[in-house]
Image (cartoon, coloured by chain):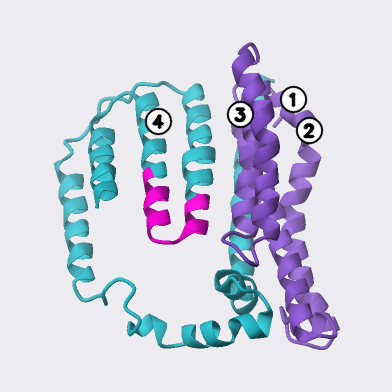
Chain colours: A purple, B cyan
Amino acid sequence: MKDYLVLRVIAKLMIAFMLLFALYVQFHGDFGPGGGFQAGVISAAAIIFYAIIYGLPAARAVVPDWLVETMVGAGVLLYAGVGIAGLLLGGNYLDYFVLARDPVEGQHRGIFWVEMGVLITVAGVMLKIFYMFAGRGRGEDA
Amino acid sequence: MTLLMMMAVVTVVIAGRRNLFAVVILFGIYSFLMATVLVALDAVDVAMTEAAVGAGISMVLFLSALHLGRSEEMKPLHKPFLPLVVAAATGAALAYGTLWLPAFSDPEAPIHQHVARRYIAEGARETGVPNIVTAVLASYRGYDTLGEVTVVFTAGVGVIVLLRRSRRRKQGERR
């Protein structure tokens, strides 16, 4: 679809807003609807949109495979790491109250990092599945 | 109700189609209708997920799968009556089961009596997060969410392992 001028221009306009909306959903999740999972799928959808319009190699240049594969594992590790940080600071596993001096502040910090872990893993898995499907049948390395 | 009727119509049309490309597009329409239903039920975050995953990403995946195979469905080998009876019986049993459920958004329903009251009363104060859904998902039910993320991770790893191995086997055959 690289030859369709209208699609290219519209995509270029929209992808920035999609990514911005994903960040809004992520960081505003404390107050409005949304959270890590929603933000992860929206940002993955933005990258997939980019791949559809500009081609898979272009998307792979923006978000390379090693990054996607790292994201798949890093998010779970980050989430589990928040739990271990709670253990090390003298609380229970996934206990956020001990993460800061003020318990409410600790909750904020814990939820922030946990949601970040969800975002990273979800976006990574979605992108990885898309890359593997789209790369098949073209002789490309997935 | 209108939305549910539209979803039913889309489902019937999907069941009657042989052209898989049309089925994928109809599936996207179904997902968007589902997302609209979820917005009507005030579950905006689930609606976002449905619109992004159901109508967006999985449609792209279906289309790329279609690109690898044929776009016409094969003629079925069996008569569809047995599956039809099973599906109808299951649907009837489920509808029968809903007869004893409490009314929609009934505050006296058993599910709202256990811990939900405490989440609503204390959640904003204990976690400092005004959105109860986020407070429950990330804090009170942190273990569940960790499990969910692990499930997503496992699914991703499974797809990677499956698709990688089949490709290597193909290369081996070529040699």
What is the distance, in whole Å, between disc 3 and disc 4 at their CAs?
A: 18 Å
Q: Is residue B4 left or right of residue A129?
A: left
> Which stretch appears magenta?
B33-49
Q: Which mark is residue B43?
A: none
Inspect the image, locate mark 3, and give the three-letter code of the amino acid beneath it: Ala
Q: Which mark is residue A134?
A: 3
Report the mark closest to the observer, 3 or 1: 1
Q: Is residue A109 above or below residue A28?
A: below
Question: Looking at the image, which residue sits at the far top?
Answer: A3
Quarter that holds the N terminus of chain A: top right
Residue A138, can we see it?
A: no
Inspect the image, locate mark 2, and give the three-letter code of the amino acid beneath it: Val
Instruction: Please name the residue shown 33% across and 82% down the image.
Output: B109
Badge 4 marks a residue whose secondary structure is helix
Q: Position of residue B108 (x, y in %)?
A: 33, 85
Let me know if residue B88 is in the magenta part.
Answer: no
Instruction: Please name the residue shown 71% across and 66% down the image.
Output: A114
Which residue carries the number 1 mark? A58
Quadrant for residue B100, please give it. Answer: bottom left
What is the distance, in whole Å, between disc 3 and disc 1 at their CAs?
A: 13 Å
Whether label 4 touches label 2, CB < 8 Å: no
Give the chain of mark 1. Answer: A
Q: Which mark is residue B25?
A: 4
What is the distance, in whole Å, between disc 4 and disc 2 at their CAs?
A: 28 Å
Quadrant for residue B76, please give it. Answer: top left
Inspect the image, locate mark 4, and give the three-letter code of the amino acid beneath it: Ile
Badge 1 marks a residue whose secondary structure is helix
Which residue carries the number 2 mark? A62
What is the distance, in whole Å, between disc 3 and disc 2 at their CAs?
A: 16 Å
Q: Is residue B81 left or right of residue A139?
A: left
Q: Position of residue B80 (x, y in %)?
A: 18, 39
Quarter that holds the C terminus of chain A: top right
